[in-house]
Amino acid sequence: MTIEIAGVMTILFASIILFIKGWIRMDVVAMLVMGILGLTGLITPEEALSGFSNPAVITVWAMFILSAALYQTGVARIISRQLLNFTGTNQLKMVALVMLTSGIMSGFINNIGVAALMLPVVMDLSRATSIAPSRLLIPLVFGCHLGGLTTLIGTPPNLLISYALRAEGHQPFSLFDFTPVGFGAMLGGILFMAFVGRKLLPERDSMIKGHSKDAIPSFYALQERTFSLKVKPSSPLVNKTLAQSRLRAGLGINVLSIIREDNSILDPGPNTTIKAHDKLFVSGRMDAITALQKWRIHDQQQNMDLIKHYLQWDLDIFEAVLAEKSPLENRNLLDKDFSSRLNINLLAVLKGQKTKRTRLREHRFTQADLLLLQGSAAQLEILRKEGSIESFRKIPPKELTARYRLHEVLFILETSAESRTYKKETLEEEIGNSLGLSVLAKIDSDDQPRLIEPYSEVKPGDKLLAKGFIKDLPLISSLKDLEVSEERIAGTQSLESDRVQLAEVVLAPRSLMEGKTLREVNFRKKFGLTVLAIWREGRAHRTHLHNIPLRFGEALLLYGQREKIEQLNNEPDLILLTEKTRKPIRPQKAIISLLIMIGVLVPVVTGLVPLAISAIIGVVAMVLTGCLKMEEAYQSIEWRSVFLIAGMLPLGIAMQKTGAASLLAESILSLLGNTGPYGIIAGLYLITSLTALAIPPPALVVIMSPIALQAAASFDISPQSLMMAVAIAAASTFMSPVSHPANLLIMGPGGYKFKDFVRVGVPFNLVIMIIVLLLLPVFWPV
């Protein structure tokens, strides 16, 4: 093994580890690979940058734009609706037609785009037929994956394989060369799913009931978190607006409706005034409200000297310096919660001359931060050893008041004799979460603060030194004049009207909201809608939603004005899970966009124009004819995929140039060589298919292409046959929800769990593999 081969192999295996572990974004890994290859001289700078001018990369981003134009003008929606009109109520027929429809469209439109387009259509079918979404959505995305196998432009692996063949002097694939094998696999997959696979799909009664329009609240178990508050005439909330009451901002309480003199006010806005005797139907934690009613907050100003006195005691408060390359950097406590893991309280963050003492759970740490932490020295030493902090020191009491002004956010809290006993963590996380509550110490009978051990109890009558949002403390007093009742909402009919409704959405594939909390995106103010629940990992979350980072594929239950919900159709970050209010943006351009797409494909089929050139001309035509705006074109491109492919292509060049591909091929073929040509094809298919569970298909194809070409040359196998097997195996992402964005997209709406994909995907993948291996020698003789 030469030094060059060792260098390429090191980069290859390091990139694979990074892909599997997910420590760094996939596109960043690819850029890192490209940069290191150029710096080390394993390839020339021109070769390192060649990925961005590669025809495959150009074709990929151009097809993203062409797909978006067909979507925006309504062509794809017309095709899907016409085909699905024949489904009826028979589940077998419905599964088959859903897969066939998505498969046909995915041959020419990006898989993720087809899944996003078809998702609301299939959800409407589910509601109309009372068939659980979980019985239809996996067939939908599997149909998308199968359809991508039927044409050269159906999926990026097909394009990359074809251009890899051309680069090595072999005959590349034409537009429909994949069709005989791919379409055969698609038909076989549809038959298997219709007759066998659908019996492996989950069918949960709650989902069937929950996704019928009249029972969405039961699906999200909304009733479990709804109750009523009756406003007494003596309440300080009387004549205040909902915004002034801070019920939502301070306590996380969403007011769903107000009953006033037998009239119902649905989805009351922030400027709605609270009147005496109003009955407020709300969602939130009733146990938290009843607990807060039994708290007594001592006047902070009157007790300020006492609070400062308490800070003179040793309360295990330290100042910590964030370490260089700390795992906390650019993250917050919602991502990295050392509070629950090590029982350490974050009390303040000092950045330059500015001190931040509230909303700390959402603060993203930077290297310039000084952290004020409460915890034992042993616990902070753990943080230091794991590289989160560089050093820490005990803070003198004078600095707590002079430098951090910690006393300004402290108060004395006293639980009443009627309160029940709580664990300290329960008090902070469940009851006082919205108030930003942290308990620093318990005040004993001698009026001295004592540290509370983790998981110790807070008993009735205890007096506590606590930290929280001072401006929201009057809320606790106002709760005493509210009559709390377990009366719950009756159902959808009590929440909806001609102008107010419930709706479900999921994050769109390229949503900028991913990883951000509802508070960070200012969801309520931006959209004028309330998020009542988030469906995540098979269950509904209904409280403290403003602190939950949003994930791709989660379903959000929204409540608000119908016109606001309809406006989400034009929102690129969200997909509305009903097609009834969705309208194409430019339906008058549908015929033009269809003709342009045909004009792109015909010259390619006849061999007159290369695919990349034809696709670029098609993009320009779509923009010039008004089918798509240039801003929409840029937004439609999946830039992560583009940079991933462009960054990994130089690795394929380095593998060929240094001989690393030959070495890997020899190692693999030493295991498969005795099995003959068919065994080699089957072995490479299986290796590629299993590796696709962890490595993105485009990157995997770049890695496997030189190995497959070397194997074809060594054993005199048709390179087209072997390369097509690798492309199909890489694109057959059926076995895991995280192996393709389209799989993640349906996780929330379908209520799926990871094991559902394994149970259905493994046998399905095996069936597709058998069909492909049987058809390949027929159409592409070995």
Image: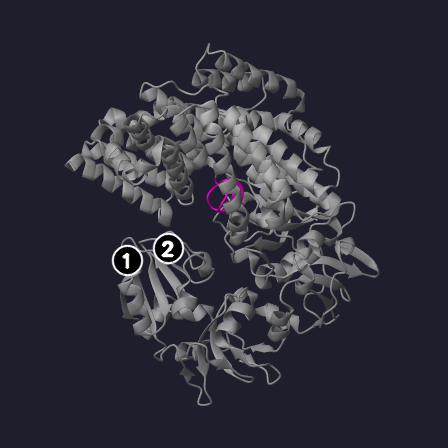
Q: How is the image coloured?
A: one colour
Main secondary structure type of the part rendered in magenta: loop
Residue 177 is situated, as x and y percent measured from the top left of the image, at: 48, 21
Residue 332 is situated, as x and y percent measured from the top left of the image, at: 42, 56
Instruction: Mark yes or no: residue 239 visible.
Output: no
Residue 519 is situated, as x and y percent measured from the top left of the image, at: 53, 53
From the image, tell me which residue sits under label 1. 323
Q: Name the foreground residue: 452 vs 685.
A: 685
Which segment is the magenta one? 733-744
Looking at the rendered structure, the kind of residue marked 2 is: Phe
Of mark 2 and mark 1, the one earlier in the sequence is: 1
Pointer 1 local density, CA inside 10 Å: few below 14, some 14–19, many at least 20: many
Q: Name the foreground residue: 484 vs 52.
A: 52
Up-down: is 33 above or below 251? above
**Residue found at x 60% / y 16%:** 595
Mark 2 element type: loop
Looking at the rendered structure, the kind of residue marked 1 is: Ala
Decide if residue 567 is on the left or right side of residue 779. right
Q: Quadrant of residue 70?
A: top right
Q: Residue 722 carries which label?
A: none
> What is the spatial separation of the Cα atoms under label 2 and label 1, in whole angstroms?
11 Å
From the image, tell me which residue sits under label 2. 365
Pointer 2 local density, CA inside 10 Å: few below 14, some 14–19, many at least 20: many
Mark 1 element type: loop
Instruction: Mark yes or no: residue 443 visible.
Output: yes
Decide if residue 49 is on the left or right side of residue 535. left
Q: Does the magenta stretch include residue 740?
A: yes
